[in-house]
Image: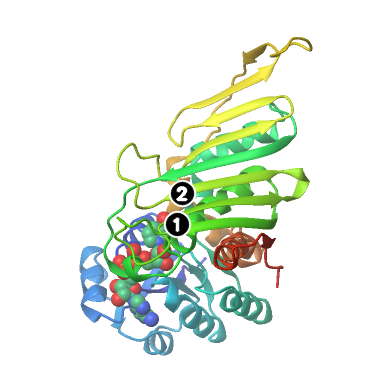
Amino acid sequence: MKPYKTVLVGCGSISNSWMKACQDIPQIEICGLVDLNLANAKKTAEMYNLGEAFLNDTLTAALNTCQPDVVFDTTVPGAHKPVTLEALAFGCHVLGEKPMAETYEDACDMVKAARASGNIYAVIQNRRYDKRVRTVEAALRSGVIGDLHTVNSDFYIGAHFGGFRDVMDHVLLLDMAIHTFDAARFLSGANATDVYCHEHNPASSWYKHGASATAVFQMTDGITYNYRGSWCAEGLPTTWECDWRFIGDKGTLLWDGKDEIKVEVVSSEEGFIRDVEPADTDWVDWEESHNGHGGLIRDFVDALDSGLPPLTHCEDNIRSLAMVFGAIGSAVNGQKQPVPAHP
Ligand SMILES: NC(=O)c1ccc[n+]([C@@H]2O[C@H](COP(=O)([O-])OP(=O)(O)OC[C@H]3O[C@@H](n4cnc5c(N)ncnc54)[C@H](O)[C@@H]3O)[C@@H](O)[C@H]2O)c1
């Protein structure tokens, strides 16, 4: 089978994760590199030995010249909508970075455009391709802690990026919490229906807006999901994957966001505090090549081959983005509110 001709748009820092992964995925042939700053496209071509690739500062030129099957969108959030719509209209499949868009309305337009085109538009939510996330998911699905009713996640990191994040509105919710909310949906198997969110930017914050947030989500299946996070928390950080607690009617699972997963389940039916005992969790088999961006791009290629929607298809991903915009709406209004409906 011939490789999928692919144009990558946005040759900034995250594009390296894509380019490195694609070096081991022969079904993807990078034939064009686009960046508003052409020097970035040139640098990427040099780093990954793509001397033959077409380099330009507009997607339009790369589409017309390369006639690609696929567009990879690794631009900044504000460019995701125009890039995706242009690529879909040209007849390409699109795999893009999170978050889909800067407003829910824009994301809905993108989902509708993908639906109308018949092409695949999927979003990189690389944490779904993490062995530890898959192991927690398998443990929860096994029923070891019974029916889930409460999920907590904590995210505390003092991250000094510089660049677009420093001047973004709702930076934590829009640029980071999308990963955590998507993981909460993936791990709980539930969707959010309502949210109350308090967002703040501490006086010491080096971000323009919204570096910290606390949100309570009502999920389907009677689950409550509590999120607490900050991107301007110096000292004693959590991991980027968060510190998690899952409580079911038979016990509790803790995951520290690293390699420690602990489970305790009730072992008696009497007593003020019931006796508990540890339960084992088996690590899932997970190939290194299926971690992170590489795993997701491989699944995207399988979806192109089969025509079946990939795990992070836009029709699914928009439910995670709805949590982001529900939380933002609640933070702005100061009220509990419904999570926006699926388009
Ligand atoms: N999945 C992850 O774990 C992860 C991690 C980091 C960043 N990201 C996401 O990746 C995206 C990019 O982040 P980054 O850190 O690489 O940013 P960056 O600023 O380092 O790179 C973005 C690049 O896109 C280019 N660009 C912007 N608009 C463009 C347009 N319209 N056409 C062509 N090029 C354009 C810029 O010139 C720049 O080179 C963001 O959406 C971010 O949220 C995801």
Q: Depth-wise, is mark 1 or mark 2 nearer the camera? A: 2
Q: Which amino acid does label 2 sit on?
A: Gly
Secondary structure at badge 2 equals strand
Which residue in the structure is indicated by mark 2? 229
Pick the residue in front: 44 or 134.
134
Identify the residue position indicated by label 1 in the image: 176
| Viewer can see residue 40 | yes
x and y percent of residue 240 in the render? Answer: 41, 45
Tell me which label, 1 or 2, sits earlier in the chain: 1
Do tag 1 and tag 2 residues touch (Cβ < 8 Å)?
A: yes
Horizontal relation, residue 212 to residue 46: left or right: right
Quadrant of the image occupied by residue 333 = bottom right
Of 205 and 54, the residue lying toward us = 205
Please name the residue shown 34% across and 67% down the image.
208
Picture quarter with ligand 1: bottom left
Residue 296 in view, yes or no: no
Estimate the x, y position of residue 309 in percent, counting from the top left: 65, 62
Q: What label sits on residue 299 in the rendered view?
A: none
